[in-house]
Image (cartoon, helix red, strand yellow):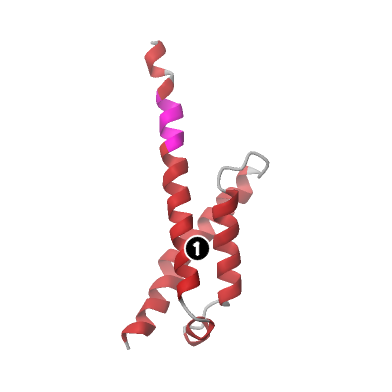
Amino acid sequence: MDHLLGIPNAVSLVVYVVLLAVKIFAFVSSLLYSAEHYRVAEKWSKGGWVAVTGIAALLQGAWFVPMFVNLALTIATFVYLADVRPALAGLRRR
């Protein structure tokens, strides 16, 4: 039975690493587009998305951050990846 006690810790570690990687990817992606792209796509400003995704990556798993703040930043990161990034990428193809 003792060998099963490590499974929740391993799952937590995998989730932590995956979320950290996703947040770093979103942060780097938000840096790659110009402020003009954000304006033309009618999305929130580049500075706003860079700040949100950067703070999300920095605070991922920090012990002093309340869980609801981390959850909100994770949701914001996924909003960027699901809505903003595709709109910005669509502008490059034109």
Could you tell me which residue is drawn at 41 percent across and 65 percent down? 82
Kind of residue at badge 1? Phe
Tell me: 86 left or right of 64: left
Identify the residue at image location x=66%, y=45%. 65
Most common SS among magenta residues = helix
Furthest toward the right, the residue is 64
Q: Is residue 55 above or below residue 20?
A: below
Q: In this rendered view, identify the residue nearer to me: 23 or 69.
A: 23
Judge the density around disc 1: few (<14), some (14-19), many (≥20) Cα neighbours within 10 Å: many
Residue 50 sits in which quadrant? Answer: bottom right
* Residue 1 included in the magenta stretch of the image: no
Residue 14: quadrant of the picture: top left
Check if residue 8 falls in the magenta segment. yes
Residue 17 in sight in this render: yes
In the displayed structure, 6 sits above or below 75; it is above
- View extreme (top): residue: 1
Q: Position of residue 75 (x, y in %)?
A: 51, 56
Point out residue 84 in the picture as x, y percentages from the top left corner: 46, 72
Which part of the image, by quadrant, shows the N terminus? top left
Q: Helix, strand, or loop for circle 1? A: helix
Quarter of the image where the C terminus is located: bottom left
Q: Looking at the picture, how far across and down is residue 81, in whole percent?
A: 43, 64
Residue linked to disc 1 = 27
The magenta-colored residue range is: 7-13
* Residue 39 vertical placement versus 3 (above, below): below
8 vs 20: above or below: above
